[in-house]
Image (spheres, rainbow, N blue to C red):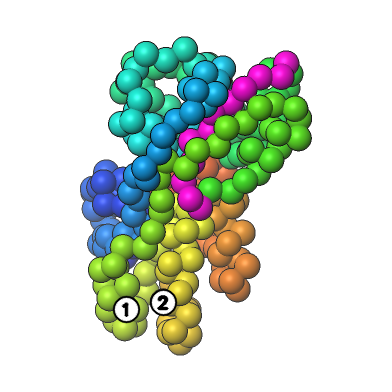
Amino acid sequence: MTKKIVLTREKTKSKQWQEYFIQNGFEVYQIPLIETRPKKVVFTSKQLEAEWLFFTSVNAVEYFFEKQPLNYTYKFAVIGEKTKEKLAEYGISPNFIPTQYQTEVFLSEWLNQYPEKTSILLPKSNLSRTIMEDTLTTKGHSVFPVELYETTAPAKSESALITLLRGNEKQIIIFASPSAWKNFYAVAKKFPNQKENWRIASIGNITTKAIVADGWKVTYQAENFTMKHLVDLIIQEEYK
């Protein structure tokens, strides 16, 4: 029996995983449950003169360099392998990468390695958590958060998701953010009898917490919080 996977990230970020799953014998559906778009931003002199620039997502890198030329003097810190790879496209190698790709580990390790007070520019989305700026500010650093982009639910995805849910088939659905989960849950809770048909895969602890808080179980979460590790885990477990 062919296993069925639903990818919920933006299509451009799901393409390689769609192909990877297909190569491994899965039937794949793409239903993007989030989309991003840039916001109008005017950077202040203090923001542009910060010593450090923290990137926590690929989107943050893309939208930042759409607005700013490459005449930077920042030190760079990133969370995530894909974020590091995107930064490399601009010819930049980060000065700091945590041993695990999660905010709490990033903060602990960076604060331990760089104890001196400094200034930090923090590009983010409208839905980003405030734990990073709150923690850094508490430790005495000057933090300049700037909302570069907003995350919304694609208009066409709700109808596609409803159609899929009505099919009453067993699926594995992958979530890479709490935002994607919330947009799914807003529709899925209207189909309580379908809940047992869905096995949930989560990219990391924050997304998992959002899923569990809504009363759902997470079947798959990789120890390393990357899409590659999560996808490999699903393939390995489904074909034991």
Query: Is 227 inside the magenta-drawn segment?
Result: no
Q: Quadrant of residue 90?
A: top left
The residue depicted at 48 percent of the width and 50 percent of the height is 126
152 over 110 or under it: above or below: below
The residue depicted at 59 percent of the width and 48 percent of the height is 129
Q: From this viewpoint, is residue 107 visible? A: yes
206 over 16 or under it: above or below: below
Instruction: Specify few, some or many for label 2: CA neighbours under 10 Å numbering under 14, 14-19, or 20 or more.
Output: some
In depth, the one of 150 and 218 nearer the eye is 150
Horizontal side of residue 221 vs 138, given as left or right: left
Instruction: Specify few, some or many for label 1: CA neighbours under 10 Å numbering under 14, 14-19, or 20 or more.
Output: some
The residue depicted at 45 percent of the width and 52 percent of the height is 176
* Circle nearer the N terminus (1, 2): 1
Q: Position of residue 66 (x, y in %)?
A: 30, 31
Query: Bounds of the magenta span?
Result: 116-127
Q: Secondary structure at mark 1?
A: helix
Q: Are marks 1 and 2 in contact (CB under 8 Å)?
A: yes
51 over 193 or under it: above or below: above
Q: Work out which residue is located at the far right of the displayed protein and give it.
A: 139
Q: Secondary structure at mark 2?
A: helix
50 over 173 or under it: above or below: above
Q: Amino acid at mark 2?
A: Val
Q: Position of residue 180 (x, y in %)?
A: 43, 60
The quarter of the picture where the N terminus appears is bottom left
The quarter of the picture where the C terminus appears is bottom left
Q: From this viewpoint, is residue 97 visible? A: no
Q: Which mark is residue 162?
A: 1
The residue depicted at 76 percent of the width and 30 percent of the height is 139
Residue indicated by mark 2: 187
In depth, the one of 43 and 148 nearer the eye is 43
